[in-house]
Image: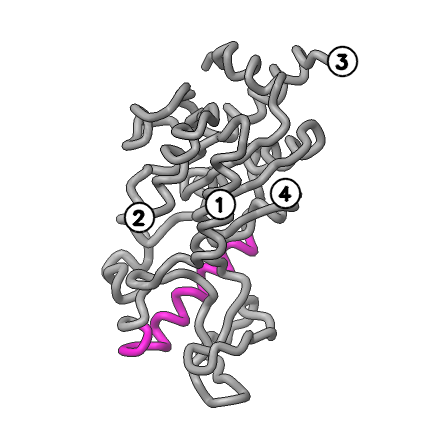
């Protein structure tokens, strides 16, 4: 794997970095999605496990799936891609992570400014009255669905399900950050889930230098300034190391 020199040159004059991540960076930590064909839940469709209709038809089934996912993310750890992304905060004026992932591994790695486009698995709220549910989820054998103590509604995870809109305020803020960034890293995303996938294209149209980090070509590859075809756990530490070796103020 070779890091193009232009990436380092751009970082040497950059003040604002945006890191846009998808499922690929979490996969490097061992987190599978419901699309994995060998998964325990492969016999269920995404609409059964990740939609309000599916939840209302079988709330206990959906809740058990999400409780299992919480247990899973509690067992895994941020990988070198997450860690290198967080370490960039030491060297640039502003680093913003925009993520489609719901596992909060970026925060666990040390990133302090994270915009979650699809919500997260850690927080929960009532599906009826929408009050937050603050009790801890997971880590127990009892996976029965919690009930809201205020209205009796079912508690649901604070993730964006199929058929639901992304949080508009977060999406708007992510767009502003992408357009204002000097360099944007696009990590581990297929570029097929909109409107999030439009952010790198939006950024480049405003002059942001956009670098794709992905082992494979994606729908976004033709729109990138540079594509580094490697896992983020390899590429991001290498980029940071090369940048520090050539940093102008050292």
Mark 2 / mark 1, whichever is N-terminal: 2
Q: Nearer the viewer, mark 3 or mark 1?
A: 1
Foreground pick, 81 / 150: 150
| Residue plotted at (54% across, 65% down) | 123
- Image vertical order of residue 93 relative to residue 247, above or below: below
Q: In the rendered image, which residue does mark 1 sit on?
A: 174
- The reply to whether the C-beta atoms of the residues labelled 3 and 1 are less than 8 Å apart is no
Q: CA–CA distance between discs 4 and 1?
A: 16 Å
Q: In the rendered image, which residue does mark 4 sit on?
A: 111
Q: Secondary structure at mark 4?
A: loop
Q: Position of residue 214 (x, y in %)?
A: 40, 28
Mark 3 / mark 1, whichever is N-terminal: 1
Q: CA–CA distance between discs 3 and 1?
A: 32 Å
25 left or right of 105?
left
Query: Dot 2: within a 10 Å radius of its alpha carbon, few (fewer than 14), some, or many (20 or more) residues?
Result: few
Mark 3 / mark 2, whichever is N-terminal: 2
188 left or right of 217?
right
Q: In the rendered image, which residue does mark 3 sit on?
A: 250
Range of magenta residues: 55-75
Q: Nearer the viewer, mark 3 or mark 2?
A: 3
| Residue plotted at (55% across, 41% down) | 97
Q: Secondary structure at mark 1?
A: helix
Q: CA–CA distance between discs 3 and 2?
A: 45 Å
| Residue plotted at (39% across, 57% down) | 166
Q: In the rendered image, which residue does mark 2 sit on?
A: 36
Q: Quadrant of the N terminus?
A: top left
């Amino acid at each position: 794997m070779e890091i193009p020199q232009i990436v380092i040159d751009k970082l040497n004059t950059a003040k604002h970095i945006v890191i846009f991540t998808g499922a690929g960076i979490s996969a490097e930590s061992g987190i599978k999605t419901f699309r994995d064909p060998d998964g325990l839940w492969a016999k269920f469709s995404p609409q059964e496990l990740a939609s309000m209709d599916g939840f209302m038809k079988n709330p206990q089934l959906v809740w058990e799936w999400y409780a299992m996912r919480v247990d899973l993310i509690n067992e895994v750890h941020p990988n070198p891609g997450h860690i290198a992304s967080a370490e960039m905060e030491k060297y640039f004026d502003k680093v913003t992570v925009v993520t489609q992932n719901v596992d909060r591994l970026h925060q666990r790695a040390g990133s302090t400014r994270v915009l979650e486009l699809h919500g997260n698995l850690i927080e929960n709220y009532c599906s009826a009255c929408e009050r937050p549910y603050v009790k801890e989820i997971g880590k127990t054998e009892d996976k029965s669905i919690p009930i809201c103590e205020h209205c009796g509604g079912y508690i649901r995870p604070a993730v964006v399900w199929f058929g639901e809109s992304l949080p508009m305020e977060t999406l708007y803020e992510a767009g502003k950050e992408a357009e204002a960034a000097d360099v944007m890293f696009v990590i581990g995303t297929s570029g097929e889930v909109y409107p999030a996938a439009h952010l790198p294209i939006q950024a480049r149209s405003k002059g942001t230098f956009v670098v794709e980090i992905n082992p494979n070509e994606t729908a976004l590859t033709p729109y990138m300034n540079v594509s580094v075809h490697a896992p983020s756990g390899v590429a991001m530490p290498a980029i940071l190391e090369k940048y520090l070796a050539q940093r102008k103020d050292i």
